[in-house]
């Protein structure tokens, strides 16, 4: 069957490239920020802010609406619908911000950490301001115009980064992490209207339609809370702020391939799925091809970070963070598998199978959350990380099976698209682990860590590329991500004069 939506694949690719480029710019700033702040602040500082953020995110996600998905999926959108979405988001953020601030002391008592209370009050003001951002970005997403949104994120990150570092140098306290983001909003809110113009009006014309979608969004958000914030709350409440600071900072580093590649392509992928909604064959091809490409890119990067975790700890975090490399290893692995699992979620949303999505997600969280709690009491923070990695394997298998049921292909079709990157990564891991003893320095200075990182990373990359190409050739050089990457590199190679 011919593609009824010519140009959509190209728009998705360009949109994904734009989002990824922006995320890489943001990640570059985050790396510099981490290098500076990790030496000005302590793991306890990061842990305190992470605990407060986890407490807030619970309330935030329980009331999140995801109205943007309705605006993108709907065939026709008028101004009243945009204004209704903006108005309802403003009401939500105002009420939520006030609730977080009003219950700050109660939440601090519940978490057994009194310093969380004033932090939550500032976070309440922060979220109230979120209701003022322009709804015009949803219109741009419908049009596959992702550039303005990326610019807004990058500029906002630059402003927050500069303010946070300045505050950290001045005060050397966790308040730098809190007030940097708050102060940045005084600039990023008006900037959003300059990039995505929309003069909002207070309207509730389409409130019933948006609330109908929100009931499933609420249930989905409850699952995401358990998934994303459950480990933080368990570690912070029962193990301690030091371990929580180690875990959150390690995740920020280890999940870089996921946050900078897997996450930013979700918006263009969702828009592409919406355009192919009535062609099951095209939708299936888009999904399997996208899964294969994502695995080809992020599997070697995530496994590579895990392999050089001790050196990353020394270079990126410094002497106050001894032992963080273990957290980096497990965070890289479970973030990788979770990213491949969550790649299936937009399929259920765009096909309006929210009940199935929520039911399956809830069942998986009914396994993961008790496993995390039991592991925390039995083996501490390391046990939590092991439980996360183990349940991530289960999640990957179940979500790919469910996506196959939805699109009409078996689990084997998805596994055939991703096995080569995993086998090549295993070969890379064996090579790096065999090479490390012969290159490891006598001491553990920062210069030695940099030197070893500079030797292991290129060696591992070379082995992975060679193994991946060999496996592709053995498989008969099928059409897929390897061919796409080679074609892209061939076009990008300078031509002789």
Image: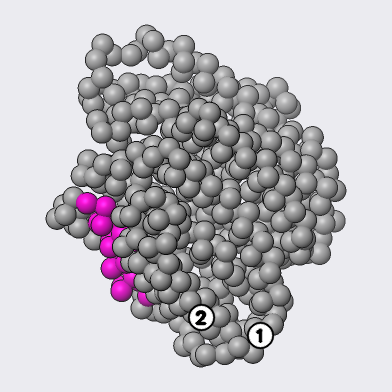
Depth check, front residue: 336 or 368: 368
What whole-number distance in Å separates the C-alpha atoms at marks 1 and 2? 15 Å
Which residue occupies the foreground of this view, 26 or 489?
Answer: 26
Residue stretch rendered in magenta on the structure: 173-189
Total number of numbered labels? 2
Q: Is residue 177 magenta?
A: yes
Please tell me which residue lies in front, 92 or 292. Answer: 92
Q: Nearer the viewer, residue 64 or 477?
A: 64
Q: Is residue 456 left or right of residue 274?
A: left
Sequence order check, earlier mark of 1 and 2: 2
Badge 1, how many Cα within 10 Å: few under 14, some, many 20+? some
Mark in the foreground, 1 or 2: 2
Q: Main secondary structure of the magenta part?
A: helix
Q: Is residue 291 among what the camera can see? A: no
When the figure is inspected, residue 436 is found, relative to residue 206, above or below; the finding is above
Quadrant into which the C terminus falls: top left
Question: Relative to 118, is 384 above or below?
Answer: above
The residue wearing badge 1 is: 206
As displayed, is residue 50 above or below residue 125? above
- Residue identified by numbered label 2: 91
* Label 2 CA crowd tier, 10 Å (few <14, some 14–19, many 20+): some
Mark 2: secondary structure: helix
Is-magenta flag for residue 255? no
- Would residue 93 appear left or right of 188 to someone viewing this image? right
Which corner quadrant of the image does residue 11 belong to?
bottom right
């Amino acid at each position: 069957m011919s593609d009824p939506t010519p140009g959509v694949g190209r728009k998705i690719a360009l949109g994904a490239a734009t989002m990824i480029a922006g995320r890489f710019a943001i990640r570059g700033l985050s790396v510099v920020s981490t290098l500076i702040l990790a030496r000005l602040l302590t793991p306890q500082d990061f842990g305190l802010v992470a605990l407060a953020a986890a407490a807030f995110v619970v309330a935030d996600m329980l009331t999140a609406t995801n109205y943007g998905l309705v605006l993108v999926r709907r065939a026709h959108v008028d101004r009243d619908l945009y204004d209704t979405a903006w108005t309802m988001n403003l009401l939500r953020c105002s009420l939520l911000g006030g609730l977080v601030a009003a219950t700050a002391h109660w939440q601090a008592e519940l978490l057994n950490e009194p310093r969380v209370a004033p932090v939550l009050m500032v976070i309440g003001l922060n979220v109230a301001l979120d209701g003022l951002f322009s709804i015009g970005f949803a219109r741009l997403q419908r049009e596959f115009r992702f550039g303005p949104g990326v610019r807004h994120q990058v500029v906002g990150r630059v402003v927050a980064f500069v303010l946070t570092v300045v505050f950290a140098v001045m005060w050397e306290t966790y308040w730098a992490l809190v007030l940097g983001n708050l102060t940045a909003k005084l600039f990023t809110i008006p900037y959003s209207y300059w990039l995505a113009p929309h003069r909002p009006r207070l309207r509730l014309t389409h409130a019933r339609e948006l609330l109908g979608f929100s009931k499933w969004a609420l249930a989905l958000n409850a699952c995401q809370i358990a998934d994303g914030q459950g480990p933080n709350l368990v570690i912070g409440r029962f193990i301690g702020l030091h371990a929580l600071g180690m875990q959150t900072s390690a995740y920020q580093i280890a999940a870089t391939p996921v946050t900078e590649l897997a996450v930013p392509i979700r918006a263009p992928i969702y828009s592409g799925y919406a355009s192919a909604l009535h062609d099951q064959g095209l939708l299936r091809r888009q999904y399997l091809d996208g899964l294969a490409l994502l695995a080809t890119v992020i599997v070697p990067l995530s496994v590579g970070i895990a392999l050089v975790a001790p050196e990353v700890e020394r270079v990126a975090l410094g002497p106050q963070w001894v032992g963080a490399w273990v957290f980096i290893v497990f965070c890289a692995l479970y973030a990788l598998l979770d990213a491949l699992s969550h790649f299936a979620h937009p399929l259920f949303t765009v096909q309006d199978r929210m009940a199935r999505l929520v039911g399956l997600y809830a069942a998986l969280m009914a396994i993961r959350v008790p496993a995390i709690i039991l592991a925390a009491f039995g083996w501490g923070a390391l046990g939590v990380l092991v439980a996360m990695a183990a349940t991530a394997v289960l999640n990957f298998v179940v979500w790919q099976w469910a996506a196959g049921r939805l699109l009409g292909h078996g689990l084997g079709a998805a596994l055939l698209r991703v096995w080569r990157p995993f086998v090549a990564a295993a070969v890379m891991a064996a090579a790096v682990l065999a090479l490390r003893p012969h290159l490891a320095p006598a001491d553990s200075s920062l210069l030695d860590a940099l030197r070893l990182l500079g030797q292991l990373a290129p060696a591992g990359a070379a082995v992975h590329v060679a193994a991946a190409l060999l496996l592709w050739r053995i498989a008969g050089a099928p059409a897929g991500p390897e061919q796409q990457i080679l074609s892209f590199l061939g076009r990008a190679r300078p031509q002789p004069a």
